[in-house]
């Protein structure tokens, strides 16, 4: 397997920086260890021990992105609209992603890049995804919010990554997963090594057997959901922090009298306004309805429609919940598999 | 359920609408207007085809988009019609539009009525208020292919005579002898010599036979509830009853997440569902 | 604080639910808990990880009779909610808990890892060779606490703390740096801070006084004071609207800042505004004094959160 000495990492990141913005987890200035993926510049310290507050999905599905520009103009008696879609060109690389984040990119790919006709081949997503290189740092330790071992492969998941680094003495073993990864691993910054891969983290597990059905069995027990959701503040953090959540809103902004843009931005199913109709009717009026739908989407509907869970066990929704909610408690309360 | 190919949408730019121009505005009721529009690109207009029941997202760039059922029939090649009830921010802005104004359209989306499976069957159509919009498309389709179907009965209800849409159509439908068309208003009004009574009751009183019949209902949730109960009493099974659902939508392509009813998305799996598809999730 | 459990059980004789805290086994800290039955109340705890201001749940439970375990500062929020008519005094039973000073466990977790026991009785904060000054993860409001005694209370529990955390001698850390900034520097400072905002509205949802919630103007299509875009100017504008709506209403509980997942120092905005209100009107929200300006009809005691 290939190996990169620790002292070559900066050179690797500089090499990547030549034609891409390199995103790496860093502690945000002025905060007590709030970690976010941010553009890396030489000298910046990369934080690989702590967990980032947000996943890397923003690099393929930004919090806000312009879908197209529009302009009104007069053509004789008629008003006409001209629509122009910007081409995205910027390349990006992410360094020290976690396996749970990278794996979720594949889930998103299936939704936004599927060529089978079941989904749409999203132009903006495709441009960003195609221009993204993912270097994952495999987890050899975890915290008690992690539960990726519940899912297939757990911390050893390789899906979504181009290159995976395994921490070993003096540097990292590098396993190429894609052609891009192989190209990188062939660089002179790497060398051959016969070191063994380190043991990877074993996290807490949740019982996933028959989970979708267990959830549907409880679906009509609204009191159960009211009890489950009663501490939930109905904010959007768990959705935004989830590497697999992908719901969005669409809105227009006029930027001059006659021109503007249409945007797509993250939206969260825990917001009351998310399903509020203009008539005033809301099919999910209570936090309990919304919480139920959120979990059903992740663990019942999505598996039913797509054959996989909409969750990789990254634990962000647990670590960062302002009300201390733990999705694993709900899965437990749904009963044994 | 037949899956209708979503022809009008470019697979790579599903969220980018096509510019279109309004060619006519029909004031249907104080709160409902029908807008007839054509795509600016004649090639797209020529290629445009859909099934009755399919929807589109029509919008005014700078204001926003909303979802509407197409209310014109597929045989209508020179325009696409949407009937819009003024309820909120976007529909209020749409109501200000006049012929010659520009809109942007993403259509057709979703799955229409599985009309090919209904050949040889009797069709019972029951529409309340703005719910008649998709049913108008369906009815006109059926009339275009009249020989393919058995008996056709149509019930159209609204609160007052002024709330009944499609004046010209109604006169025509009432005259036709090969369909039974009944318009009803909720309670008696001076100058109204037609039927009175809420639609589910009028429909039930007509005692339409359930055998070999497909019932298609669309309207406000209260009406749907009573109509379903009436159909059950008339002996209709869940698989014989179809409806089109309405939910808040943003993307129209099953991604933005908000229009799901259980595991199904109204925008892509629907908006047409049979009651058997929905189970208790309605 | 063992005496808390019988008090909660007693309260359950006259209320539908008691809001308190229970230990989360995974997190290793206290998390908000809803006690409906005496058996459930056996899980109640109170320690220096009970930072959450449970008053946030009261307007959502306005149709119920609710018991609530409240720290001195939480009681100010309850008093303010009552003054505004969002909560009925007769609808709440306040269990005033004497408070040792609270740490922000999320900040602690960011130092040591989620789920680690980070706070010992002596106030030293250390884990696996890493240390962090307790002041850094202690809530700012707790240093020089102004409200050790609840302003509103039906029963108290625990001895008044003899060692209230010392007040800061002068602004420290980010406050010191911020105080020294010019207006232009502050502008840049906030632009940078809000470039991280993801508009998850945890600040709003965790705020006991943000009672509009589901019909909040910063998410409203009309009048559209703040755009929906997740970018620095729009997010900043949205937050400033929220902050301004809390003028004379914010009790300084710090929940917005604690809830913020990306660590935006929101209290810098609210502290500034609260100081101005106190200086101009001699008024602190959540006290017994009548508010100097009323943006709410306090005669209307049927506040409808869902409207």
Image (spheres, coloured by chain):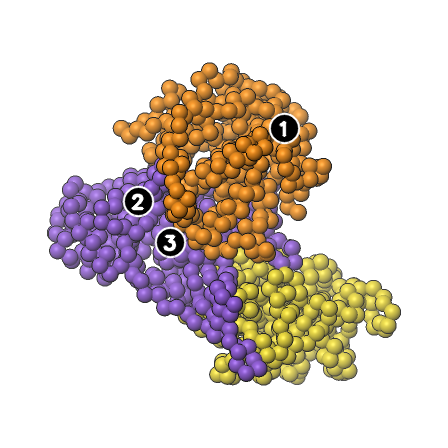
Chain colours: A purple, B yellow, C orange
User: Which chain's residue wears label 3?
Assistant: A
- Dot 2: within a 10 Å radius of its alpha carbon, few (fewer than 14), some, or many (20 or more) residues? many
Find the distance from the CA under tag 3 to the CA under tag 2: 16 Å
Tag of residue B177? none
Estimate the x, y position of residue C295 in percent, counting from the top left. Answer: 64, 41
Query: Within the image, what quadrant is residue B139 found in?
Result: bottom right
Estimate the x, y position of residue A330 in percent, counting from the top left. Answer: 49, 40
Circle 3 sits on which residue? A57
Is the C-beta separation of discs 1 and 3 under 8 Å? no
Question: Is A82 rendered above or below residue B147?
Answer: above
Estimate the x, y position of residue A300 in percent, counting from the top left. Answer: 48, 52
Q: Camera-side residue: C98 or C242? A: C242
Under tag 3, what secondary structure? Answer: helix
Find the distance from the CA under tag 1 to the CA under tag 3: 49 Å
Closer to us: mark 1 or mark 3? 1
Q: Earlier in the sequence, mark 3 or mark 2?
A: 2
Residue B213 visible to an observer of this rendering? no
Tag of residue A26? 2
Circle 1 sits on which residue? C289
């Amino acid at each position: 397997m290939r190996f990169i000495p620790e002292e070559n990492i900066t050179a690797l990141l500089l090499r990547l920086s030549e034609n891409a913005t390199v995103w790496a987890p860093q502690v945000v200035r002025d905060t007590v260890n709030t970690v976010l993926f941010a553009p890396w510049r030489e000298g910046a310290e990369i934080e690989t021990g702590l967990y980032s507050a947000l996943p890397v999905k923003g690099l393929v599905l930004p919090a806000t992105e312009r879908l197209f520009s529009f302009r009104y103009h007069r053509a004789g008696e008629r008003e006409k609209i001209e629509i122009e879609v910007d081409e995205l060109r910027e390349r990006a690389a992410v360094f020290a992603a976690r396996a749970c984040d990278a794996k979720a990119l594949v889930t998103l790919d299936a939704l936004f890049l599927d060529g089978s006709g079941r989904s749409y081949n999203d132009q903006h997503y495709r441009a960003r995804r195609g221009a993204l290189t993912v270097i994952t740092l495999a987890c050899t330790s975890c915290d008690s919010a992690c539960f990726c071992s519940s899912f297939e492969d757990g911390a050893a998941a390789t899906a979504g990554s181009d290159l995976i680094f395994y921490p070993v003495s003096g540097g990292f073993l590098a396993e190429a997963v894609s052609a891009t990864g192989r190209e990188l691993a062939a660089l002179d910054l790497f060398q051959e090594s016969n070191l063994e891969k380190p043991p990877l983290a074993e996290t807490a597990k949740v019982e996933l057997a028959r989970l979708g059905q267990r959830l549907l069995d409880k679906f009509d027990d609204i009191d159960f959901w009211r009890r489950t959701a009663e501490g939930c503040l109905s904010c959007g953090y768990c959705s935004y922090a989830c590497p697999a959540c992908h719901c969005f809103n669409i809105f227009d902004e006029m930027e001059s009298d006659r021109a503007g843009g249409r945007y797509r931005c993250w939206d969260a199913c825990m917001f009351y306004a998310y399903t509020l109709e203009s008539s005033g009717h809301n099919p999910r009026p209570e936090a309990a309805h919304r919480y139920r739908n959120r979990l059903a989407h992740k663990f019942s509907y999505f598996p039913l429609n797509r054959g996989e869970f909409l969750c990789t066990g990254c634990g962000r929704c647990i670590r960062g919940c302002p009300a201390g909610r733990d999705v694993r408690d709900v899965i437990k309360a749904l009963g044994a598999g | 359920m037949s899956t209708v190919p979503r022809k009008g949408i470019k697979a790579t730019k599903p969220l980018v609408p096509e510019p279109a121009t309004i060619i006519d505005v029909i004031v249907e009721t104080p709160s409902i207007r029908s807008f007839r529009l054509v795509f600016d690109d004649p090639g797209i207009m020529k290629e445009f085809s859909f099934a009755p029941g399919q929807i589109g997202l029509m919008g005014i760039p700078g204001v926003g988009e909303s979802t509407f059922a197409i209310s014109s029939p597929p045989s209508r090649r020179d325009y696409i019609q949407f009937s819009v009830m003024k309820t909120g921010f976007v529909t209020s802005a749409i109501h200000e539009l006049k012929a010659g104004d520009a809109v942007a359209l993403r259509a057709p989306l979703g799955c229409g009525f599985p009309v090919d499976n209904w050949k040889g069957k009797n069709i019972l159509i029951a529409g309340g208020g703005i719910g008649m919009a998709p049913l108008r498309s369906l009815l006109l389709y059926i009339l275009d292919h009249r020989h393919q179907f058995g008996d056709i009965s149509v019930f159209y209800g609204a609160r007052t005579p002024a709330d009944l849409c499609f004046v010209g159509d109604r006169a025509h439908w009432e005259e036709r002898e090969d369909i039974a068309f009944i318009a009803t208003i909720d309670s008696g009004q001076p100058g109204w010599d037609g039927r009175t009574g809420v639609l589910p009751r009028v429909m039930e009183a007509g005692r339409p036979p359930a055998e070999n019949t497909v019932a298609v209902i669309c309207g406000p949730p209260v009406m749907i509830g009573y109509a379903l109960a009436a159909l059950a009493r008339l002996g209709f099974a869940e698989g014989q009853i179809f409806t089109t659902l309405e939910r808040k939508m943003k993307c129209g392509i099953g991604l933005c997440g908000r229009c799901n009813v259980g595991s199904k998305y109204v925008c892509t799996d629907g908006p047409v569902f049979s009651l058997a598809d929905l189970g208790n999730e309605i | 604080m063992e005496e808390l459990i019988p008090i909660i059980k007693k309260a359950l004789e006259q209320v539908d639910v008691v809001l308190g805290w229970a230990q989360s086994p995974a997190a290793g800290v206290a998390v908000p808990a809803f006690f409906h039955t005496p058996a459930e109340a056996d899980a109640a705890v109170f320690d220096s990880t009970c930072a959450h201001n449970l008053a946030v749940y009261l307007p959502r439970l306005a149709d119920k009779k609710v018991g609530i375990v409240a720290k001195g500062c939480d009681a100010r929020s309850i008093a303010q909610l009552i003054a505004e008519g969002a909560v009925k005094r007769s609808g709440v039973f306040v269990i005033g808990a004497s408070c040792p000073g609270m740490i922000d466990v999320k900040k602690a977790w960011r130092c040591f890892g989620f789920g680690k026991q980070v706070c010992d009785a002596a106030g030293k904060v250390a884990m696996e060779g890493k240390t962090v000054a307790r002041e850094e993860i202690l809530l700012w409001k707790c240093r020089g606490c102004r409200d050790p005694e609840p302003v509103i209370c039906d029963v108290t529990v625990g001895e008044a703390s003899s060692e209230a955390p010392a007040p800061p001698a002068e602004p420290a850390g980010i406050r010191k740096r911020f105080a020294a900034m010019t207006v232009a520097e502050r502008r840049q400072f906030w632009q940078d801070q809000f470039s991280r905002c993801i508009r998850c509205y945890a600040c709003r949802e965790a705020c006991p006084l943000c009672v509009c919630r589901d019909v909040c103007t910063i998410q409203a299509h009309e009048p559209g004071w703040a755009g929906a875009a997740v970018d620095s100017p729009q997010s900043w504008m949205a937050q400033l609207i929220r902050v301004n709506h809390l003028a004379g209403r914010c009790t300084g509980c710090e929940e917005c800042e604690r809830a913020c997942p990306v660590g935006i120092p929101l209290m810098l905005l609210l502290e500034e505004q609260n100081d101005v209100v106190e200086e101009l009107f001699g008024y602190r929200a959540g006290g017994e004094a009548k508010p100097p300006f009323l943006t709410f009809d306090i005669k209307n005691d049927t506040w409808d959160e869902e409207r």
